[in-house]
Every structure is written in C-alpha cells, then in structure tokens.
Image (cartoon, rainbow, N blue to C red):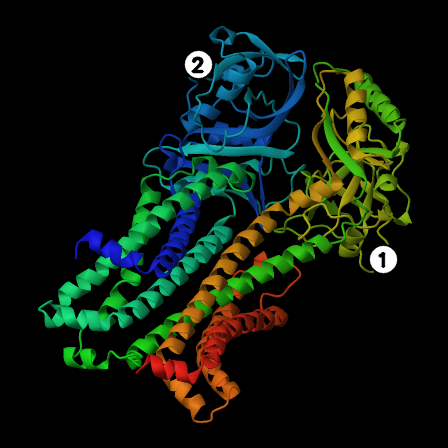
Amino acid sequence: MTPLQTLRSLLRAPILTLTIIGTVGLGIGATTAIFAGIDAALLRPLPYVDSGQLVRIYTDAPPNRFRFSVADYLALQAEQTHFEQIAGYTDRAMAFSNGDVAERLRGKQVSWTYFSVLGLRPVLGRDFTESDGKPGNPPAIIVSHGFWLQRLGARQDVVGKPIRFDGADFTLAGVLPPKVGPLEQGLQFFVAAQWEVPSRKGPFFITTIARLRPGVERDSAAAELRGIVKRMFPIWKSSYQDDRATWSMIDLKNHVAGSIGTTAGLSIAAVALMWIIGCTNASNLLIARVTSRRRELAVRTALGASRGRLIRLLIEESGILAASAATLGVAIAWGGIQLLRSFGPLYFARMQEVALDGPVLAVLIGLTLLSALIFGIVPALHGTGGSVDESLRSMGRGFTGSLAVRRLRRVLVGSQFAIATPLLIVAALLLTSLSELRRVDLGFDTHSMLTGSVQLPPAQYQTPGSVTAFWTELKTRIEALPGVTGVTFADGLPPEGVGNFNNFDLEDFPTPSQQSQPVTPWVAVTPEYFRVFGLLLLEGRLLNERDVPTGQLESVVVDRAWARRFFPNGSAVGKRFKEGGCSTCPWTSVVGVVSDVKYAGLDAPDEGSVYTPLSPEAHFRNLVLRTDANTPTTLGSVRGVLRELDPTLPFSNVATMDELVEQSLAGTESLSILLGGFAAVALALSVVGIYGVMAYYVEQHAKDITIRVALGGSSAAVLRLIVAEGMKVVSSGVGIGLLSAFAFTRLIGNLFFGVAATDAFTFVGIALLMLVVALAACFVPAQRAVAVSPADVLRRDT
C-alpha cells in the first residue's frame, strides 16, 4: 500500500485514529515541554564564557551555608592563587525617577571584577575598572539594555554622563547586551561596590563567584580555601567563634539552578508516565484493529505477501499515526514552552532560555520514534503469522482473537492503571499538603492588613535627624487616614519575608567548640508592631521607645517557640546572649515573650524568632497598616501621603497580607496543579483503555452472551460476569500501582506537609476512586450487551 492508501485506511476508522493521535500527541508534547524546562534549568551550560570553570564559594557551617562577609571577600581576594579572578555581588534596589514617575528598580551591587569573571562585555561603553571599586571614588553604574532603551531613549551620548538613582548621581559606565545570563535576568542596573575594610567579621551578605585557572584541580583549589580560612580565624575570633566553619565551592550552574532537582524529576516522571499510558492505549486500540483485520491480512498472505511485508504495512500505519501525533505534540510543546517563559521565571531560574531547539527537538523526534515502535511492533507481530487456513476459517462473527492477544490487551490496560494510581496518589498528597499549608496558623489575623516598602535615598537623607523626621511624619499622616486603625514598621514580614537570620551565643548555654551557634529569624520592629499584629504578651514586657538602639543592642523580645527551644524548664525573660558571633559586644537581654508568628515559611518548623528595636535611622522600612476601609482606597491615600512628603519615593512591593501568604504558596500550588492535571489525564486515558477493552470484549462475545441469556441465564448474573472480567484487570493494575506508590512517595516525602507520605486515607481513597471509575467504564458496555434482544443477535449471525 502507498502512504496515501494507508492514510485512507486509517481515516476509515476516524475515532480510533483521532484517539491515538490526541492521546499520544498530548504525551509527546507535554513531555517535550517539561524536558525543555529541565534542559534550560539543569542540563545546558550557563551562557557565560567557558562556564564550566565558574564556581560559587560559600561559608560552610553545617547545617548552614552562609554568604561571605566583606572580611571574607577581601581575604580571599588577597590570598587565593587558584582562581583567575573572584567577584562578589549582593542584591540592591534603588529608586529611579524620570521627573514624573518614581519607581523602585531591582539591581545588584557588584565588585568591579564581576563582568570580567563571567565573560560579559558591555555592548556600549566600558566595563568597571579597579578604580571604580575603590572607596571614595565617584560611583559608577552599568545598566541593562532594556533600561537603556525604555528609560534613556537608547541615546548613545548618555554613556559617561551621570544618571540619578536614590537621589545621587552615578556615572553611566556602560550598557549590557540584550541577551545576558541568569544572574542578570530581570535586573535593571549594576553598581560598582566600594567595600571598605571592616571592623568585624560580619555581616554575611556577599555571594562570591570565581573562575578557576586553566588546569587547576578542584581538590587543590578547595584545599587552598580551607587553608585561608584557618589563617583568618584568629584574626576575627572576637567576632566569629565558629572554628568548624570553612569555605567550600560548588559549580555556579548548580547554584543558579537551586534545589529544583526533586520538582524537575517529579514533573518529567509524571509526563513520561502519561506518555507511556497514551502509547499503551494506542497499542491496545491497534491490537483490536489488527485482530478485526486478521482475515484481510490472511488473504494478503494467501496472495503472496510475506510476513515481513505485512509487518512493514502495519508499522507504516503506526508511523503515520506517530507522525501525526508528533505534529500535535509540536503545537502542545510550543504552547507549554510559552507558558514556561511567561510564568516559569517566578519559580525557577533560566526559564527565559527555554526553547524548542536542537536538543529539545531531538527528544521530540526520539519520543515519536519510540511511540511508533511501542504501539506498532506489538500489534504487527500479533496480527501476522500463524496458519492462513485457520485465520480464514475462524473469522466469523464469533471470533474473539487468540488467547495471547486477549491476555496482552489485559496486561496493557492493567499497566495503565498501575501507572495512573501512583500519579493520582502523589497529586492527592500534594493537594492535601497545600490544603494543610493554607490551614497553618500564622499567629495573627491576616485580614485587612496592607504592606509595602519604602527606601530613603542616603544622598537625600544624609543626617539621622532627617531620616527620623521623615518616618515620624509618615506614621502620623497615615494614622490620620480614614479607616486606618494601626500603623507600624519592620524590616521583615511574615510568612517568609525575613532576610536576617542571625546567630547568637547564650550566656547560660555557651556553644561548645566544634559546633555552630544557633540561628533564628531576627525582625527589627517599632514598638507598635505587636499591637498592630495582635500578638499576645505571654511574659515580661514589650519593646518601647527606651529600647531603641543607640549603637548597641540591649533589649529584645522573643516568641514562645524561642523560649521553649532554649529554656524549656524556666523563664526566658532576663536571659542574656551575645549576638552575631561578637564576643566583645555587651550582653543582650530578653525582656519579653510573645506569641508565635511564622517568618521562615509556612512549612518550616517553629524554631523561634527574635524581635529587635528598629533603628530610627534605618533608611529602609516595610510599612504595615490595618484598615477597616476599602483596600484600594487606602492604598491610594497612602501613595498620596508619600507623594506629598517626597514625590521621588516609590511605594514598592505593595501587597495585602493575604496576598503575601498566597505568594508563599505559589510554588507548591503550581506543582500540585501540574501533577493533578497529569494525573487526571492519566486516569481518563486509563478509563478509555478499560472501556475500549470491555466494549471490544462484549462485541466479540455478543453471541455467547445472548445464548447464555436465551438459555435462562439472568441478566444480572451475566452483567456481573462481564463486569468481573474487566475488574480483575483493573484490580491487579491498581494493586501494583499502590505498591509502587508506597515505595515512591517515601522517596519524595520532603515535598509533603501535614500528611504522611504513606497516608492510608489517601491510598485507600485513590484506590476506591480508581475502582469506582473503572467499574462505571466496565458497566456501560456490559449493560448495553445484556439489553440487546437475543433474537436480534442470532438473526445477525445467521
């Protein structure tokens, strides 16, 4: 047969053809799209020059990994010999105003070596130089290509001229090319850091990267890092006592990718299993088709066609189906890739690099070829061979196919349920986890709370008095707005908006040598914070204006979890510690204990938090207010107050507290919806498979069924017999699926919250769901069979 004749033959069975193309195409497209995301995030090299030589260096203090302090960075820069260059960076946000609108933009403060380490060159202007990094020199800045186009009018004469950020002038050194790497994606500017020699070891805020020299062994570089740390330790011992901490390094690609390995593996496994179910369904349908065509194939054999030729004919049909499915798969993959580009960057790194390119297309082609083989070879082998005479004699209306074919079809359907069951269980556990996370008590009423951040430019607010006066006036004016019932400030917000995790050493329980000091979230707040959030005072007193730090931290409030963790058998009030690893600093005292609030994430254990007085001279604050008025109206009023006080100040990161909670759940919610969708499709395909098998079984056994009924067999008994035939297949598949799910969910138990990885209710519930849905799929063709008049069937067969 020619390809055109083969296509016409397939079009004579449009439902079968479209079902195969749709299910297999969905599997190919979804698997390709997910692979494209994994390829971009984990597999392909970083888009930097010789990126395999790039590493990230960090302070390794198990179980914690810290960024570098200025002291660390300067020591590494001075003493290392195994790296071509090192660089450091930290996140920075600054306000930019074009005279009409003030906006807060995201950027980085970077060492002058940053772009040369990565191999990036400005497309316009120059790179940073060593003089740009020396304290006291005019500050220099490099901007993104988008910033240059949108805010500077793509003018080339702006290079070398000052541009104003945060009320200060920065010399525009250069403009980056349109395509940059993942470390620069979404950022608008890069300021040359001018780090001075510090007086203490901390704080730790610099992410350090480096490029290995050619030919340098990583073990040798790692040994050098450990040696530098040992030599540094005595110098800074008064402010950092953890002698167990050292420096380690990882590939920069692994650092950029983050901890998405489990999520990526789970996603690709889910879509791959869905694709396998689609191919299995297609194989099942084609086995039924080739069985019904057995007489035609026998005639071809009798006329001289070899078995190989018949197999090629059937494989050709499978190839056309697979190619058609691949065409649909390309469209689905393209749509999936667009979704990853649009929404993926919110959750995963490097999603802007996702593309339907060479490696991804190779996977799509490979999936297409495998699909053709999976649902082509088996039907072809079962549909050919055997005795021609027997095939010609047996092809009456009562022919039911060989025992081997019937068993194969049952195995294929059972395998679909064995695959779909663990998918549904994992999806159900994730959805249960999401539900449990939504029920987590944050420790306060989240309704009617509005938040946003304000950053005062140091160039405009140079004196402590001007900073204090601004915050005082802002608070006074917002308190006077209609509907506002409380106003406070803090440097961090629940449920995961705290960036300060500080270490400390308790007076009563000093940290033993060779152990790391405890670390908990630290939140700097104004005294009204506890009232606005509705926190309960359990012991002692709250912070007040007398506690405002004047250079030394003397008083803090802790929460109940902190008190129970460190002083389970007594009161925490009056206990003292030294914070930040500083052994020469004065003692800090606990003056009160309040109820718990989640700051490290909804799924994090309650290990305690520390509240410190917010300095009146702090240039950055989160504004938090409660209101019984309409939120958009209140937000407009707050923006109006800010414009009146200083029109150059943007009110950024605006959100209600409920929105912050939803944002913290976004990753879990996306994964739950993704796997839930795949599981639902897998279940639907499995149901289609069992329905198809039972419908074919009923059709081929119609005469036997009617004879049984005609001889006095009850319809109910025959119905039970037919349904039992299908449920045996389903039950075995579900049983195997439960066993595999039991093993698999224990491996990914860290993804679940508030529910056991082997939760009996979920396992039993999913099993019952599978059985009930399969029962309905078996019942419909069985009911149709017993409802047909025996006389009609017998007349049809005569």
The quadrant holding residue 95 is top right
The quadrant holding residue 70 is top right
Sequence-first disc among 1 and 2: 2
Viewer-proximal residue among 456 and 208: 456
Residue 202: x and y in percent read: 65, 34
The quadrant holding residue 658 is top right
The amino acid type found where label 1 is placed reads Gly
Left/right of residue 395 with respect to residue 527 in the rendered view: left
Picture disc at residue 570: 1
- Mark 2, residue position: 124
Asked if labels 2 and 1 touch by Cβ distance under 8 angstroms, the answer is no
Left/right of residue 262 with respect to residue 499 in the rendered view: left
The amino acid type found where label 2 is placed reads Leu
Q: From what the image shows, is residue 199 above or below residue 433?
A: above
| Label 1 to label 2: alpha-carbon separation | 64 Å
Q: What residue lies at 49% left-to-right and 6% top-to-bottom?
A: 157
Viewer-proximal residue among 445 and 701: 701
Left/right of residue 276 with respect to residue 764 in the rendered view: left
Residue 609: x and y in percent read: 75, 46
Left/right of residue 112 with respect to residue 372 in the rendered view: right
Which residue is outermost to the left?
304
Residue 767: x and y in percent read: 55, 72
**Secondary structure found at label 1:** loop
Q: From what the image shows, is residue 113 above or below residue 100?
A: below
Q: From what the image shows, is residue 557 above or below residue 436?
A: above
- Quarter placement of the N terminus: bottom left
